[in-house]
Amino acid sequence: MWYVFICRDVENSLTARQQARPEHLKRLRQLLDQGRLLVAGPTPAIDSDNPGEAGFNGSLVIAEFSSLEDAQQWADVDPYVKAGVYESVEIKPFKKVLP
């Protein structure tokens, strides 16, 4: 089943985010290579593709896992979680309808 990960950053997360980004992207690429990643990306803190020093206030990931428990276990060891980037990670089942 697909699961949506709604991740909210702590304040001033940009430095920690930049440091943990290579390992974070590595894990997402593994899901992509397995055909289990629908979409992933950050939510800019301002209305801009490149928010500069304003940084980001969170991330959204939609990925396929065999259960909510498996999705939670995957999220628990994300490099952004370990680096203290995320204040919270909410995971919900997601039913893809379109496209």
Image (spheres, rainbow, N blue to C red):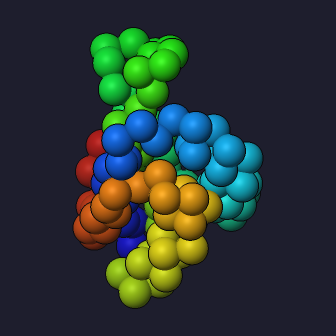
Location of residue 21 with respect to 83 vertically, above or below: above
Residue at (32% x, 18% y) in the render: 46
**Residue 66 point in image, percent of width and height:** 47, 82
Total marks shown come to 0
In the foreground, 58 or 36 = 58
Residue at (67% x, 60% y) in the render: 27
Q: Is residue 71 visible?
A: yes
In the foreground, 68 or 16 = 16
**Residue 2 point in image, percent of width and height:** 39, 65
**Residue 75 point in image, percent of width and height:** 48, 70
Residue at (49% x, 82% y) in the render: 73
Residue 78 horizontal side relative to residue 58, left or right: right
Location of residue 41 with respect to 95 vertically, above or below: above
Q: Quadrant of residue 32?
A: bottom right
Q: Which image quarter is the C terminus in?
A: top left
In the foreground, 14 or 1 = 14
Q: Is residue 29 visible?
A: no
**Residue 52 point in image, percent of width and height:** 51, 16
Q: Which image quarter is the N terminus in?
A: bottom left
Q: Quadrant of residue 35?
A: bottom right
Location of residue 64 with respect to 50 vertically, above or below: below
In the foreground, 75 or 85 = 85
Residue 78 horizontal side relative to residue 29, left or right: left
Residue 82 horizontal side relative to residue 94, left or right: right
